[in-house]
Amino acid sequence: MEKYIEVNKAAWEEAFDNRDPSWGADITERIQKEDYPFFEKEMVDILRNTDTEGKTIGQFCCNNGRELLSLVKSGKASKGIGFDIAENQVAFANEMAKALGLPCIFESVNIYDIDERYEKEFDIVIITIGTLCWFDDLDRFFEIVARCMKPGAVILLNEQHPCTNMLAAEGDAEYDPEHKTECHFSYFEHEWTVNEGMYYMTLKKYRSKTFTDFTHPMAEIVSGMCNNGIVVTGLQEFDYDISGGLFSIDHCGFPLSMILQGKKL
C-alpha cells in the first residue's frame, strides 16, 4: 500500500472514531421514510431515470454507506457493494445494512487493491463527493472501476467541480471574504497535506493525522474514464456547492459541482 494511502487510512479512522454523535444518526430513519435521501435533486432525477431495479450497484469510497443504502432501497436494486479504506466506517455501514435489512455489503480495501473477485460485477457504479481527490493517479483509479463494470454498465459521478480547486476556503491564509471567487491556486495537479481533521464529520477542529489529497483538472477525469473504455455520455455543471465548504458562493455563477455520466464499452 502506498505510504500516503496508508496514512490517509489512519487519518480517516481517527476522524470516524471522533465523529460527532449526529454524524450518521439519521441514516436508518431517512432511508426508511424518504426516496433517494442523501442525493442532490439533479442526481435523484438521473437515478429515477436509470434502470436500477434488480441490478447490482457498486460504490467506490462509500464512506458510511448512506448513499449506496439509499439507492439500493429506493431503486429496488438486488445488491449493493461498497468499498472504503476505513475499517471502522465499513463496520458501521455493514451495521446499517443489517438494521435496514438491505442487500448491501461493505468491504474495507484500498481501491487500487480491489481484485478479480469483482471483475464485471456491476451494472451501475456511483461515485460521490470527495472521492477523486484521494487518488494520485486517476487513470489507475478508473482502470479498477472499469474492470469491475459489466459491458454496457453505467457510471454516475457527482463530484466537486475541478474549478473549485483554484479557490481559497475560509480558514486558508489566502481567503478574502470580500473576493470569495478569486482564484489563488493552479487549476492543474497539486498535492495537498493537512492536519486539521475532518470537520464535517467531527464538528470540531483537532490536530489530526495527516490527510493527503490531490487536485485533478477535468481533463484527467475524462481521460481516466475514456482511457479505460468508459464513454462519456453526459455532463452537467452547477453553481452550488456539495462539498460543505463553499456554500457562501452558491449561485454566484462559479462552477462548484457536476454530474458526469458514462457507459462501459
Image (spheres, helix red, strand yellow):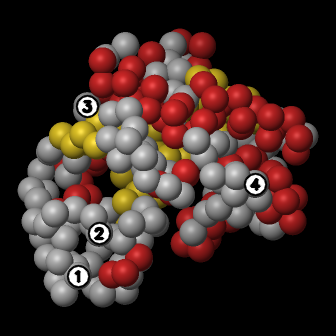
Residue at 43%, 53% in the rendered image:
205
Alpha carbon separation for disc pair 4 and 2? 27 Å
Q: Is residue 91 above or below residue 20?
A: above
Q: Nearer the viewer, residue 106 or 145?
A: 106
Q: Quadrant of residue 210?
A: top left
Alpha carbon separation for disc pair 1 and 4? 33 Å
Query: Label 4 belongs to which residue?
Result: 25
Query: Label 2 belongs to which residue?
Result: 170
Alpha carbon separation for disc pair 1 and 2? 8 Å
Q: Is residue 197 visible?
A: yes
Secondary structure category for the residue under label 1: loop
Alpha carbon separation for disc pair 4 and 3? 34 Å
Disc 2 or 3, which lies upstream in sequence?
Answer: 3
Secondary structure category for the residue under label 2: loop
Disc 1 or 2, which lies upstream in sequence?
Answer: 2
Question: What residue type is disc 4 on?
Answer: Ala
